[in-house]
Image: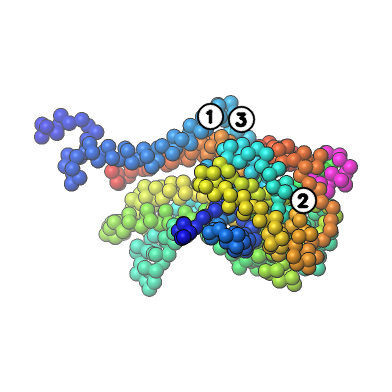
Amino acid sequence: MAASAARPSFMFREHSVVPGFGLAFGFTLAYLGIIVLVPLAALALRGAGLGLSDFLALASDRRVVSALTLSFTTSLIAAAINAVFGVLIAWVLVRYRFPGRRLIDAVIDLPFALPTAVAGIALTALYAPNGWVGSLFAPGGALAPLFGDAGLRIAYSPIGIVVALTFVSLPFVVRTVQPVLEDLDIELEQAAATLGAGRLQTVTRVVLPAVLPAILTGFALALARSVGEYGSVIFIAGNIPYVSEIAPLLIVIRLEEFNYAGATAVAVLMLMISFTMLLVINLIQAWSRRRHGHGA
Amino acid sequence: MMAPASAQALLNVSYDPTRELYREFNAAFDTHWQAQGNDRVTVRMSHGGSGAQARTVIDGLDADVVTLALEADINAIAENTGKIPENWRTLLPSNSAPYTSTIVFLVRKGNPKAINDWGDLTKEGVQVITPNPKTSGGARWNYLAAWAWANREYGGDLDRVRDYVGQVYRHVPVLDTGARGSTTTFVQRGIGDVLLAWENEAFLALEELGPDQFDIVVPSISILAEPPVALVPGNSDAKGTTEVAQAYLEYLYSPEGQTIAARHFYRPSEPETVTDASLLERFPDLELVTIDDDQFGGWARAQPEHFGDGGIFDQIYQPAN
């Protein structure tokens, strides 16, 4: 059609059930602006009041660096754990029929619904040295000898933080991978088998490439959720500076000092790191789509 | 003639451990206020961490009165909003602190680690539970009480005092964000050998959990914790509640108010007015230093010096490279 060729290239869909691209696009921008961009801009503005040299001094403060390092490494570990076990859960839920499947399916969402402080208190009770699980690893416990004389301390250590973050971010991986697995035709695997592929080959060459973008999305969402998590972590972490103090707690500490600029500076730092990481993950995702020819 | 239909309402912004105290006091004040020929008054309460509560008032919560854990928190409201006059501390008796408390030790039954005074906290193998002074008002009193003991013990040698307080915090395995969190860690999770606690919280823990599990140890010296109260005329004038709000705070100093405070394990600032003298027997005598003592110089100096960004508490936690 000649008319469509003359249209500007950013109007990629010609027909839509929603009338008026201009109206819809305008609404999108306004909504995003009010809900997301204005609060973030206010945050950045408050941080700007600090001045660059103060900001850099704060960014290189050892306590801030240590808290940020802890927050991002524990989040990466938790997201990675969920990227493996979340996919496994999604696989079982999609490919098998068993009694209680719907119940388990519903349980996956509970970490979304629960106030995170409740999750934190429950997990701490479980993993504390006198809790059901924690006592197994505490000195004298059944599993303690595996970890030497001191046993393994879960609650009140960085391990506890990983446990809490794994709990709160589990649904993100399961819920992004599940629909993709449901769309994946089992015939593809059968075809691979008839062409002589082994099970490992089928998984690595057929199943994984199709699901990888979804896994990456789930991983990114889980990571983002974990980095910002506060409520559940402060109960289980022990909160010792340089050991188990997370960056969001440092923000709260700055607020307790009525130091709004200092709090904002840590927040802006977290925002910058998170944004960079999410951008990188997005790029990998786009690359993986092109490479394997799935998705858009 | 009919009384106006709208009963007066006050908003009291307070901190966490005063829930039970003000529940009883509010009812008593309502009765007293009506007996004076006034309409009934309902008092709405807001509880939370003291610093966080101060921030909500700064950010616009229309409190008529504030009853917080630290003078520094009320000072912050006065400075940031101008809704409280600078001289608020002189406007009510006893430095605007109708009740006080102090810091004592809660130890496991029989005191197995023999913790009898501040010096025992840094003994080999002793674990101390206290919240983070950065996020908890109560924890700042803990810290200052330890400081006061060391200052006396080491004759004012500041290096040794700092070293001792630093040692204490190296014996802390879990640094909770609030006083109730620390109590839970010590009592429910079984972590640590000694909990540094407000005297009123220690009594409450003992009462609720049974005296068969814990003992209260009173150290040789501690600090006089003065949780202050203040009217917020910047809010109450606009709402027309100044008169009843002022009466509410003054009633805290009445025999009834003082007796209620004592019943909830706070030390009344005018103990001679308490109607039930047996309530006073539970408060042991010990040497109490105040925040206005020369070593601290009042909250205006102690707050930035010890707890400000880069202050002594932060320095204690700087690892020695």
**Is disc 1 placed on a helix, strand or loop?**
loop
Q: Say left or right for B137 vs A116.
A: right
| Front position in the image: B151 or B16 | B16
Is A54 drawn above or below residue A70 in the view shown?
A: above
Helix, strand or loop at disc 3?
A: helix
Q: Which residues are magenta?
A: B145-159
Q: Quadrant of residue A18?
A: top left
Give how far across and how far down residue A248 sits, in percent: 55, 45
> From mark 3 to mark 2, how far is it between C-alphas?
38 Å
* Front one among A188 and A130: A130
Quadrant of res B190: bottom right
Q: Quadrant of the C terminus of chain B?
A: top right
Residue B1 seen in render: yes
Camera-side mark, 2 or 1: 2
User: In the image, A148: left or right of A44?
Assistant: right
Q: Which residue is mark 1?
A: A49
Residue A57: which disc? Answer: 3
Give the camera-side residue of B277 and B195: B277
- For image coordinates 65% across by 68% down, the residue present is A142
Label 2 marks which chain's residue? B
Task: State the image coordinates of residue B185 (x, y, percent, origin top left).
Answer: 66, 60
Q: Chain of mark 1?
A: A
- Counting residues from the start of the chain, the first of labels 1 and 3 encountered is 1
- Residue type, label 3: Ala
